[in-house]
Image (tube, helix red, strand yellow):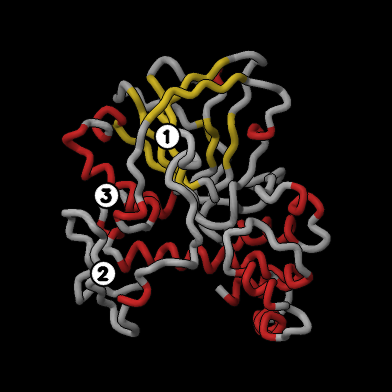
Amino acid sequence: DDTDLSRVTGYPFQELIDGLNDPNVASDKTLLLLLSMKRFIAHDLNLKGLSLLRSLLAERMTDARRRILGLHFHPDAAEFEKNGVLLKDFDYYSHPDNADEFRYLLMMCAAAPDHHIPNITWVEKNVTSSPKDPQTQAHIDTYHPVIKMWVYDQGVVNMDTGPLHFMKGSGRNTEAKLRWLYSVTIPPAVQAQKEPSLRYHGDPIAEGLPDILRPVLPLPEYKRTLIIADTSSIHHRGTAVPGTVRRTIRVRDGLQGGIPRRNPYDWDGWDSWQFPGAYSDYSCGTTHQCAVPENTNIR
């Protein structure tokens, strides 16, 4: 990671660390903000990769939590970590008989123990298309993984109603994504200060990003398709003829569209993790076998 960061910024990684350790460069307030949920920190150290470091640390710690809890054994974990999005049968996962399995799926996506997963209540939510809707601009919600959910009815949500568009794999901090993040966060970063949900205006193919923005549509084999997405990936609401209503099912208000955001650096399970060994008896809180086996290598 430090090599990638240096290659992107053109500065030795140690210069960023030295700056963070120098009280004349980085105040106590800056250090507190560094490990906070604040989406963007305007600081001269962004020239040396401060925003990139925050994104990398958040991603690595999310991956580590998933492994500490043994949630990387979930059958969908590899796909979700690679692509940042899953499409599932909503009628199956919303059935009371499958409630425990649904929570296990959400725990894996959020890399969180059971007590961090709220009880999910679904409500109908209609969105009316407008040419001034900022959500139609490609963007990331924030610098760290965030879980949001949508439910699309077969035959109700289609290209004409402005479905979610999503760039698979763009939640991972590849060198190409880091280069884009660097371009929008280096001083003076006027747009980032104005709108910290960073907007993407580039050419993903030319820039080497993992995919293009593609529409997410209901799967034909399901009556209703559940979409679970990490919106630290590049995404946007699709456009439609002004006045068009997109009818979806969403998580009730108050849950930020999915799993409520938490500070990616703050977790009560770290103390139970015994370094340098690859073993934890920290329980994920469900009936599933989520503890990491003794012989598991954490990478």
- Disc 3, disc 1: CB below 8 Å? no
Nearer the observer, 8 or 187: 187
Residue 139 is situated, as x and y percent measured from the top left of the image, at 63, 44
Left or right? Give the position of 1 relative to 68. Answer: right
Nearer the observer, 232 or 218: 232
Q: Residue at x 24, y 69 (%)?
A: 292
Q: Which residue is mark 1?
A: 251
Residue 265 is situated, as x and y percent measured from the top left of the image, at 49, 67
Instruction: Calculate the distance from the C-alpha at mark 1 to the C-alpha at mark 2.
Output: 29 Å
Q: Which mark is residue 104?
A: 3
Left or right? Give the position of 198 relative to 275. Answer: right
The quadrant in which residue 16 appears is bottom right
Crowd band around label 2 with a 10 angstrom C-alpha radius: few (<14), some (14–19), many (20+): some
Instruction: Calculate the distance from the C-alpha at mark 3 to the C-alpha at mark 1.
Output: 17 Å
Quick one: label 1 or label 2, which is nearer the N terminus?
1
Residue 297 lies, with reference to residue 198, above or below; the image says below
| Mark closer to the observer (3, 1) | 1
Q: Which residue is mark 2?
A: 282
Q: Residue at x 17, y 59 (%)?
A: 289
Which amino acid, by three-letter code, is at mark 1? Val
Secondary structure, mark 3, is helix
Q: Residue at x 38, y 30 (%)?
A: 122
Crowd band around label 3 with a 10 angstrom C-alpha radius: few (<14), some (14–19), many (20+): many
Crowd band around label 1 with a 10 angstrom C-alpha radius: few (<14), some (14–19), many (20+): many
Which amino acid, by three-letter code, is at mark 3? Tyr
- Disc 2, disc 3: CB below 8 Å? no
Quick one: label 3 or label 1, which is nearer the N terminus?
3
Secondary structure, mark 2, is loop
Residue 55 is situated, as x and y percent measured from the top left of the image, at 57, 63
Give the residue at the far front of this rendering.
Answer: 254
